[in-house]
Image (tube, helix red, strand yellow):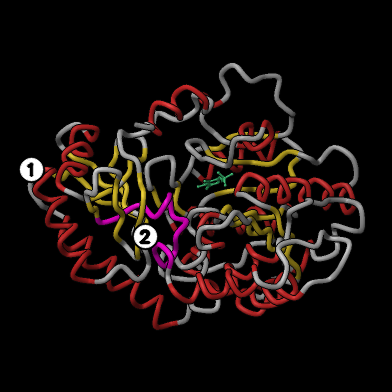
């Protein structure tokens, strides 16, 4: 018998410590493994399948575009790319959008825009971007350097210069860097996802906005994980009471297809010009058609549904036996358990739910429309597993 696990182990690069589960099918918030066992999905492919697996609107949008053309290159105009950019700008107030294929690429674009903006407006040398300790911004050499966690830097140097790390929620540490270094931007996740699902303090974020205003710096919001309805608003920055200059996003944007977007607001609207950046697959019609079907559904009703589900989870888990803390925003939730989270996760898999980890926490990233009865059952199971 063909065993895909063995083939994978032999031929796929060893970059992932996969769980011993092979997914063969799914629908909505349910997935089925190769033994025919059903699970409730609480991770959505790491915040990617925004409305679950194979939801009808998304599938219809993608297959309709597949029936027309799959790709045309950026040498020509095409409707899905234009319409998605228009939709994102109308919903956020951004002026222009650059499309790439992943979160790391969206951040690479954000970093290039910040650097060029500084060149154009401030002159040579003001290239340093302040990022936060415990952040995560991607796996390319430059976005690894932007990532404020030393463990990720091991073995891959030398890195490009021009990043300085401040302590999250410590305004003084940002001020110190601004005082001693010529900077162009402050880059942050409103909720540090890979860092353990830790929302930044609102006051710290607003301090950074003020420091940026006083010192002529850009604010880059990395909304790769927090974006696209995940936290209960279209983008998480809305809940912090400011508008960034650049927003990078990916993960849930395409609803399951690879796409990244860098939203450019007023100050940097004209920073990129013909030839200054590009991507062969960027703005791919199928990915954009999928993304339009996602973004156009993130209306008040859907976002209220996210908040409702979020409240349910927080209320059910706060103070439950074996649970030390619950952090996060909307449907991006981190749970600190008394028992080792690896063991809790194993028990979850056995009992038929699929959360993931964030550092030593259990992380929940369910579909934004997970049916309430499935969510309730999943949370009951999680509570049992954490006991
Ligand atoms: C996942 C993630 C990235 C990287 O996205 P990829 O699509 O894996 O390149 C960057 N920033 C944040 C905040 C993320 O969560």
Query: Quick one: label 1, few (<14), some, or many (20+) residues within 10 Å?
Result: few
Which label sits on residue 387? 1
Location of the C terminus by quadrant is top left
Q: Earlier in the sequence, mark 2 or mark 1?
A: 2
Which label sits on residue 79? none
Segment colored magenta? 40-54
The answer to whether residue 200 is seen in the rendering is no
On screen, residue 153 above or below 295: above
Front residue of 67/142: it is 67
Front residue of 225/178: it is 225
Q: Nearer the viewer, mark 2 or mark 1?
A: 1
- Whole-percent x and y of residue 349? 21, 43
The answer to whether residue 180 is seen in the rendering is yes
Disc 2 Cβ-to-ligand 1 distance below 8 Å:
no
- Whole-percent x and y of residue 4? 40, 34
Give the residue displayed 48% in from the left and 64% down from the top.
240
Front residue of 207/386: it is 386
- Whole-percent x and y of residue 22? 34, 41
Q: Is residue 349 magenta?
A: no
Q: Is residue 274 left or right of residue 107?
A: right
On screen, residue 233 above or below 12: below
Extreme residue toward the front, this view: 1
Give the residue displayed 83% in from the left and 49% down from the top.
118
Determine whether the residue tagged by mark 1 lies in a helix, strand or loop. loop
Q: Main secondary structure of the magenta part?
A: loop
Q: Is residue 45 magenta?
A: yes
Q: Is residue 358 left or right of residue 223?
A: left
Front residue of 39/189: it is 39
Residue at mark 2: 329
């Amino acid at each position: 018998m063909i065993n895909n696990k063995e083939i994978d182990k032999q031929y796929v690069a060893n970059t992932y410590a996969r769980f011993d589960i092979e997914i063969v099918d799914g629908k909505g918030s349910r997935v089925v493994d190769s033994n025919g066992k059903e699970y409730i999905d609480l991770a959505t492919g790491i915040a990617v399948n925004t409305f679950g697996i194979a939801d009808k609107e998304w599938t219809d949008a993608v297959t309709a575009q597949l029936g027309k053309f799959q790709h045309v290159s950026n040498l020509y105009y095409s409707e899905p790319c234009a319409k998605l950019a228009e939709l994102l700008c109308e919903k956020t107030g951004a002026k222009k959008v650059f499309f790439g294929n992943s979160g790391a690429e969206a951040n690479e674009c954000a970093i290039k825009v910040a650097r060029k903006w500084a060149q154009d407006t401030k002159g040579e040398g003001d290239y340093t971007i302040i990022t936060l300790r415990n952040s995560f911004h991607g796996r390319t050499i430059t976005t690894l350097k932007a990532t404020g966690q030393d463990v990720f830097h091991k073995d891959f140097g030398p890195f490009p210069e021009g990043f300085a790390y401040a302590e999250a929620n410590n305004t003084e540490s940002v001020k110190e860097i601004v005082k001693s270094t010529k900077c162009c931007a402050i880059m942050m996740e409103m909720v540090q996802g890979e860092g353990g699902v830790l929302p930044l303090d609102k006051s710290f974020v607003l301090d950074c906005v003020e420091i940026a205003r006083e010192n002529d710096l850009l604010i880059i919001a990395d909304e790769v994980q927090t974006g696209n309805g995940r936290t209960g608003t279209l983008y998480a920055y809305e809940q912090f009471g400011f508008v960034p200059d650049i927003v990078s996003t990916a993960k849930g944007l395409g609803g399951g297809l690879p796409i990244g977007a860098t939203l450019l607001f007023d100050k940097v609207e004209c920073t990129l010009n013909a030839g200054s950046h590009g991507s062969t697959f960027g703005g791919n019609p199928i990915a954009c058609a999928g993304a339009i079907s996602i973004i156009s559904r993130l209306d008040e009703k859907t976002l209220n549904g996210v908040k409702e589900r979020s409240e349910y989870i927080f209320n059910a888990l706060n103070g439950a036996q074996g649970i030390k803390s619950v952090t996060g925003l909307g449907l991006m939730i981190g749970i600190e358990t008394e028992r080792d989270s690896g063991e809790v996760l194993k028990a979850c898999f056995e009992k038929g739910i699929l959360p993931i980890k964030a550092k030593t926490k259990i992380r929940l990233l369910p579909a934004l429309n997970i049916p309430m009865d499935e969510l309730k059952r999943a949370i009951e199971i999680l509570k049992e597993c954490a006991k």
